[in-house]
Image (spheres, rainbow, N blue to C red):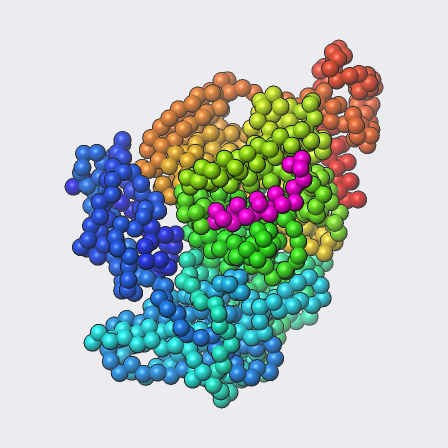
Amino acid sequence: MSTAVHVGTVAAEHRHDSPFIATNRPRLSWIVAAAPAGWSQMTAEVRLDGERVASLRGADHTLVQWPFAPLSDDRTHAVEVRVADASGSFSEWSDPLELRLASVVAWSAPFIGLDSPDRPAQPVLLSHAFRTDRQVVSALAHVSAFGIAEVAINGSVIDDSVLGPGWTSYDNRVLHDTVDVLAPLGANPSHTIEVRLTGGWFTEEYGFGPTGARVYGEQPSVAIELHLRYADGGSEVIRTDPTWSATGDWQIVASGIYAGETVDLRRRPGAGTPARILQSGVVPEARTLEPVRRIEEVVPVAIERMPSGTHRLDFGQNLVGRLRLSVDGPADTEIVVRHAEVLEDDELGTRPLRRAAATDRFVLNGGPHVLEPMGTFHGFRYAEISGWPGELGLDSVRALVLHNDMRRTGWFESSNELLNRLHENVVWSMRGNFLSVPTDCPQRDERMGWTGDVQVFAPTAATLYDSRAFLGNWLSDLAFEQGKRDGVVPFVVPDVLRYPVGPTAAWGDAATVVPSVLAERFGDEGVLRDQFDSMRAWVDSILAVVGADGLWEGHIQLGDWLDPEAPPDNPGAAKVPSDIVATAHLFRSADLVARAADRLGRDDLAAEYAQIAERTRSAFLATYVTPAGRMTADAPTAYALALSFGIATDPVQREQLGDRLAQVSRRHAFHIATGFVGTPLLLDALIDTGHADIAGRLLLQTGLPSWLYPVTMGATTVWERWDSMLPDGSINPGEMTSFNHYAFGAVVDWLYRRLVGIAPASPAYRRIRFAPTPLQGLDRAGATVDTPSGRVMGGWEREVDTLRFHLTVPVHATAEVVLPDGRCLGVGAGSHSWIISLATVPPAPHPSIESSFRDIADDPEALAAVLGVLRAHDPAYEALVRRRIDWNVTDPLPAGLFDMPPQLFGTIAQALGELTLGRAAK
């Protein structure tokens, strides 16, 4: 027995928050938390219920197939793991992992609701009395709803989740939660089950404009199966049916995701009538992802009494959730709570909410109460409370942060506090928007699962949190929605917009990108298997509209959405033509399908889609890249697509494209000039082509537009627009302005992979690539990533004349290390460090005045700005530039060109930056 080897975490499938599993053959994972140097797993043993033991040869430890017969009952089972190396010396058994089967073999409970509602989306209170005259030894409640349900037994709410069971494509899928309710049953044989039910996402009115439409149904409904097992061996199932009592006359008067909730505590539940069966045809399936929970409580940083008598609260953080109020006031007092993300003119900035009222109302019946809405949530930093009896103290209010209870896996820290705050802003935006589905924003009359947003953000999501179960659940809905449209992926999933659109590049590519990311980061080949038909169908839907030349052109696209130079009222007006964006994404998705087919052993399909990708590559290069190595659209996104997607592979051509991308970035004075599509690719394209200096200046830029500009404006989440708030503190005049939108936060994955240098070189980080990029302007950067292979820690710091690097490799992994001095090393598990002299690191190239001339020669306004700067400094320099512009770029450079003072470049950059800002303002 080896006591030096310790098996830490053991898990089944992807949830870490519950013993309940949705499959009777769960895949198992474990992590060896400690082992001697050089130790490696050669054998594992899995023990079930302390009796049956299965021996597994090899090093596999991630999502290992279930080695026993399928589980067939809902009893609690215990799984333990121990491991051995080549010597055969086993570790001790791990702590037991408890498992219980959540799936219902033959669901038969109908969905019930109000028999005669008097208004749409009417909240319902349902109840049912029952007896247990024998000793109960097991009680599982399986709860599903078309809407939001909160269940109590004998007055106790049965679990700590909220907003359950969550939003899915209700036409095809609805989830059920499974909860152990033995404790609330107690010893008393008489019981009452009560369900508070609101419409939630099911009855919400979706769409853009002054009104929306209910696309699923008019009324909420709930279905419950309570499975009881008795000590004498008997069993019983209590199901929802028309004998349950239902009333719409109770304390929750109205509830909506967008509108908020109205609660009148003076109302006592009216006499119930028999419930009515409302929904049928969709069989609930067991939850596979973590539910939404109250994750954190936030105390206000300030409470201000306004001249109007209202109280305004500042929580210091833009968050997603709702308020909990502790109040003692007279009957008939009405407390109204309004929410907003920002202030404008010293008032709540509610214009960006559009028709979302985001208002909760509570009418008191006298006495002390704790108030919290049940069926809604809001995106806010500020709240305004009117009608509060007396002064409002800090002890009386908390903001409850709500999101799916995923496990945090990524942490980052650097010497730049603005960069650190950017990272935290991205974390908060992910938390707020990973609520039931991956939404675009959490506050206005939208909050939908926009496919393009999650497509670009998926790598960051997989780094910051264990999001495999969350995104896997969403992909099931994507495949369903896609199946109704001949493979075309809709703009949003679940599809509540139901626009009759064709394939849309970058948005529909979520079908191929998200499964590929999950397979890479979590080592889950199962997600590729489950989604492979969806991946193929997406590419095939594009091929149906592609021309004979292999280009995806001439179709309506969203393109490089929210290019910073796009007008506020036209967010799709990007510098790069949408045809370039579309054809690049066809290449990428075809390539991903080919790679997935190869991994799944589908050789025929791998060859077919590889051929499609090659044909698309050839067409792209022939059409959009000039012989001189420029894109026909001289915009950063065009270059980033060709480079980061691997479309351009010839080393000479890649160098040309990279050099030009660097020049274009200088032309924009190191300000962001990309939208949703180009932004996540930009820094990788620069690093890959030897322009770390340019990448660093873009990353650390604080002017508008840039990643750090919102941070300088006090942002605590990522904004939808680069200028959601203008420098004067006013809100962008565009109709579409959110202050919590994670898409531009996709850069965070780059911070881990390239700046710190921690990246997966094989699925599940079994092999790690550590290739840090120390940037000028930073003294250190480090990160911790909890991977399926264990915890990885790495980073670097700058000292007086050296760079120090450190890396900790977990037991299940190895690492390939690439240092800036050119050394390439292979290391195993353990802690490693290296020191290199700055003298051995090739200096970053200083951007030359020459490159600026090439950038602005075809831009009269930019040329005039540069010439004005040079003329003011020394007319001789202006003459040199004019001569240079008149010459062919291949001719020798005029003598004296590089004698210009280096500080002139900064002055030129400032002039070009002011020009860029002026254009954006126009």
Instruction: Look at the image and tell me whether residue 276 can be seen.
Output: yes
Q: Nearer the viewer, residue 201 or 335?
A: 201
Image side of residue 371 versus residue 917, left or right: left
The secondary structure making up most of the magenta span is: helix
Q: Position of residue 193 (x, y in %)?
A: 39, 79
**Quarter that holds the N terminus:** top left
Vertically, is 38 above or below 784?
Answer: above
Q: Nearer the viewer, residue 748 or 909?
A: 748
Q: Position of residue 721 (x, y in %)?
A: 66, 48
- 544 part of magenta stretch: yes
Question: Which residue is at 52% across, 65% downward?
Answer: 170
Q: Quadrant of residue 775?
A: top right
Image side of residue 794 versus residue 447, left or right: left
Instruction: Look at the image and tell me whether residue 298 can be seen.
Output: no
Vertically, is 823 above or below 557?
Answer: above
Q: Quadrant of residue 566?
A: top right
Question: Which residue is at 45% across, 37% downward?
Answer: 603
Question: Which residue is at 36% across, 32% downward?
Answer: 814
Region rendered in magenta: 531-550
